[in-house]
Amino acid sequence: MPSGTSSVVALIESDRDRSKITNDAAERAMSPRALQTSEPSTRDEGVAKAQKDVEVRFQYLADDPQYKIAKPLQIVPGFLDREKRSTVRLEAGEVETIQDIRGREADFTLDANGFCYVKAPSHANTWGAPENMSGYLDEVEALLRRTIEGCDEIHCFDARLRQNGPEGTRVDGLSYNPFARQVHVDQTESSIIARVRHLMEIKADWLWKGRVRIINVWRPIRHPVYDCPLAVADGGLREDDVIECERRRLDNGHFWDTMGVVKYREGYQWYYMSEQEEQDVVLFKGYDSNKGVRAQHCLHTAFDMPSHLIPPGAAPRESIEVRALVFTHPQEKAPICLPHRRPDMAPSLQGYLFGNSSHKVASLQNALTHEINAREVEGKQIRAIIEQWKSVAAALEHSLILKTGENAALHAEVGDLRSEVHALKSCLPNEPTEAGALTFAQQTHGKNAENFLLKQQIEGLKAER
């Protein structure tokens, strides 16, 4: 089984801090200006909130000639790239209007626009605790099945919490990543193909004959978002809007995956939800193999609200993002089925060492217990797969035995036919003698052979006269 499938979060995949902008520098670079379209309303439940369009300068890939020669390169996690080996250079685009979607949520769909907003309260109350994440993933799967058609199979493969700060950490088994203040797509098609093969193994080729989608499920946690919302772009993109960027690991330089970076151009249509609450969930496409729909993926980015629109003392944004593979099965019959495997949310020993150093020995022991339990579950799944393959091998062996028996019978039959042919050949006269003719006649005419010869002789005498 490929390594890494037991962890839903890549330990060093903190790819979101691409801009390398501090909070103060980001505010200066983006220069946001609010356009409030109506007077603010009270925040009492049941009272509609005001729409707040804002004007912002997003961070895009710089228009650098080097990208025409070589792919952009990014080191992950980006916030630890002290040597600045990344070749991704960012620059602020022109001022763009970000439309507040509040009150118009029903106008947008995944296939037409690449995103949609839904109301989905969660029962989770201790975000980041590994024992609660399994229940939250169940909620995510149920939400996807309610919202999306064709959810024959769902695999949640990544979850990450986001919080304010220049660096990421890993606590209680989850990645805490900085906000991603750069227009991007999480992965390009080449990496998605590799991910599906890695996670789905023997079923991958069959699944690719159907429809493959990656859906991101994003929600605020603990309190509404006041300072740094998520913006999503309408899915009507041009073929050359997304540029593939290669990402390599910081620790060893090995290839990690490919993501999509974007240069600025006029015409993008951007949306966000003002003061988005925990029950306001945005679903957006990371990928869709169906080329017949308008939106195959969704550009997105975090952005800073103007300071005068942030309530005094407002808590900084916290959010959780889950990425899920959604498969629509093809029409043809499935091959041997692997057991449903949800990537394990339990913390790993490496995760604790990578994250907060203040964890006690008891926490470390708990992490090891989780890891051992996860390995036991994987072992059971592997044994189940082995038993399935044993059954397949036994069936193939039985079929081979039957075919061998059939071949032996055919071989014996061919031998008998050869013997019969040889016997017939031995009966044929080499010369036209009376004895040879008699033998031939006996083979062909049976008891009337002698009468046949007499008649032949009489006819011969008649002819001589």
Image (cartoon, rainbow, N blue to C red):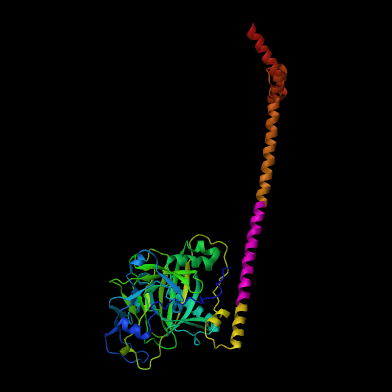
Give coordinates of residue 434: x percent, y percent: 71, 16
Q: Nearer the viewer, residue 263 or 454?
A: 263
Q: Nearer the viewer, residue 64 or 117?
A: 64
Where's the N terminus, which quadrant? bottom right
Farthest top residue? 465
Up-down relation of residue 271 to residue 314 (above or below): above
Where's the C terminus, which quadrant? top right
Extent of the magenta region: 374-400
Q: Residue at x 34, y 68 (%)?
A: 241
Give coordinates of residue 440: x percent, y percent: 69, 23
Up-down relation of residue 70 to residue 404 (above or below): below
Up-down relation of residue 176 to residue 442 (above or below): below
Farthest front residue? 83
Q: Nearer the viewer, residue 164 or 197?
A: 164
Quarter of image, res 295: bottom left
Q: Nearer the viewer, residue 247 or 109?
A: 247
The chief SS type of the magenta part is helix
Give coordinates of residue 11: x percent, y percent: 51, 77
Q: Is residue 385 magenta?
A: yes
Give coordinates of residue 47: x percent, y percent: 34, 89
Q: Is there any visible trace of residue 304 in the rendered image?
A: no
Q: Is there any visible trace of residue 381 in the rendered image?
A: yes
Query: How many numbered callouts?
Result: 0
Quarter of image, res 462: top right
Quarter of image, res 365: bottom right
Query: Is residue 8 left or right of 106 when viewed as pictured?
Result: right
